[in-house]
Image (cartoon, helix red, strand yellow):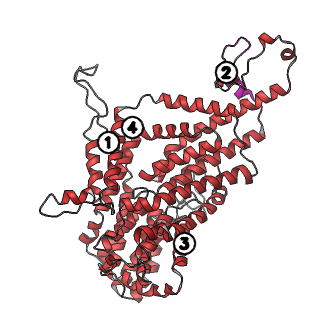
Amino acid sequence: MMKGQCSPCTLPKGWWQPVIVILTPLILSLLPFLYPSTESRCAYVIIVMAVYWITEALPLAVTALVPIFAFPLLGVLSTAAVCQVYLKDTNFMFMGGLIMAVAVEHCNLHKRIALFVILHVGQSPRLLMAGFMITTIFLSMWISNTAAAAMLVPIVDAVVLELCKTRKIEVRLEQERAVPTLQEVTVSLPRQSRLKLCDSDATFSDIIIKDEDGTPQLERKEKQAKELPENEDTDEESKAVRKMFFLGVAFAANIGGTGSPLGCGPNLVVMGILQNTFEEPTGLNFATWMMFNVPGMIICGVLGWCWLQILFMFCGKVRVQKSSPLRERAMKMFLRDHYDGLGRITQHELVVLTSFTLLVFLWVFRAPGFIQGWAHHVSNLFEDKVIIRDATPVMLMVCLLFTIPAKSQCCSDVDSDDRKPKRMEMCLTWEVVHEKLPWGIILLLGGGLAMAEAAKSSGLSVFLGQQLQHFDVMPKELIVFVVCLMTAMLTEVASNTATASVLLPVIKDLALGINVNPLYLMLPATVCCAYAFMLPVATPGNAIILTAARMSTHEMMRAGAVMNVLCVLVITLMINTLGVAIFDLHNIPSWVNSTTTSVH
């Protein structure tokens, strides 16, 4: 065979994708032919999209565009009705949240927050991991879990390398103290090396690198670290520390996404479905979402931290050893140097931080439920009552960031070349937004809402509700546990937003069919869409962590399987305790009857 020619038996990479794209609608086309009805044609499109989303035979955002041509061509929905769903206020709220996240990343505010938290939490491996997880959870509440994980990767990697370096130096010093040389034995006391191991005020340079004459030798420290013989135990321990830290970041990124409606796509999918299905307010808003999910988020974060401690410090083949004062002082100096390297907080960071804080305040107190929110008072100022939702304050803040300068500039500032005044830089520019905004996620959210709208209009929701009434014989607590467990398993092999888009309309119909509050099943199922801890294909953040941690898929599955079970148990407990107290889940609310999809 000539060089450059491919073997006739070799298949190109990804050959199966066009096969699935073509065969799936052909095989499933038997459904609308055997059962000619609007419900069956709607179910046909939804099943095809579910297969595309799970297999990723097409890009997720491209699959989300299928309803625009499939539903009109099959007589389910008109083109205008489908396209309007892609421009709901929920989508614009999501877009505004993503733009605010871009603003945080653009000014490097996330790096300052991360270093500040890690510096003040502690410098032992246990406390360092706690600092990483706290930071990641907080960031993931407001930005995507993928972005939160990616932001922490370089910081975690630098910390792990520094821990490895100080560990090597510590081993070298122990070897030197254990086997003193002849010169060390005969040297006079005034010329001995001044190692202040017991001095609590000594710095890292005082402890390690004072030579005989007392002069610091930074070059000597680095040279010693590089010349150390390879120690298998030390190397394996460093690998274990790396895996422990990065798994903590992966867990925290997924858990943090449940803390606010902006944390991940499924949160907005459920709010959009409820808003489009029921005419009256359901009681699920920004404030009540955080009241219910933040406590569960904290519990799951603590359990994740404890589980990783058990896995890597007590049960693993290579156990992470406890830290020493020497290593903690070195790490504190390392983090302090990096934090000081950021300089004083800039006007750009202050503006973004203030805008984000004000935005969260406006979201929480728009319609908190326990008091009349600011939206109610603003609406009363006018004769025609208007409904103000969460997209309004976020777009207000986004527009303000495009108009506020990133730094103060004097009018006399000019370019050195042509002596023209400098162009004032704003806190946010469209070039930055266009480059960094994940536009595909917005389409993905719209595709899920389009599926739900088609199921409601075609009568498929009513049909499913009637068929699912048979589950009424099971205890409701068992039903919610099974739903949560199945959702957590499915989200391991499919996008969390796609999982929510496929499952939540069915779960809503299941709740109506067994005559329970839809929030009782939909809310915990939505949260479980974020519990993708086992596989790198579950979320892009997991894939990033798998590569950075240099671990195998088996190791991630072993740690993630326990986290899946723990988090499912936590959300099942929370919905039956705190959820009942907040949403009155034991009673059927009046807003359930404000829709044509009610099952009688």
Query: Residue at label 1?
Result: 431
Where does residue 455 sit, x and y in percent of width and height?
35, 77
The part of the chain drawn in magenta is: 211-230
Q: Nearer the viewer, mark 3 or mark 2?
A: 2
Farthest front residue in view: 371
Which kind of residue does numbered mark 2 sit on? Asp
Distance (Cα) linking label 4 and label 1 = 14 Å
Residue type of the residue flagged with mark 1? Glu
Secondary structure at badge 2 equals helix
Report x, y in % for residue 496.
47, 63
Amino acid type at image mark 4: Cys
Q: Which residue is mark 3?
A: 486
Tag on residue 107? 4
Q: Residue at x 48, y 53 (%)?
A: 145
Residue shown at the point (67%, 25%) measured from the top left: 222
Residue 111 part of the magenta-drawn span: no
Within 10 Å of the Cα at label 2, are there few (<14), some (14-19), or many (20+) other Cα atoms?
A: some
Distance Cα–Cα, label 4 vs label 3? 40 Å
Q: Earlier in the sequence, mark 3 or mark 2?
A: 2
Looking at the rendered image, the disc whose residue lies closer to the viewer, 2 or 1, is 2
Q: Is residue 406 visible?
A: yes
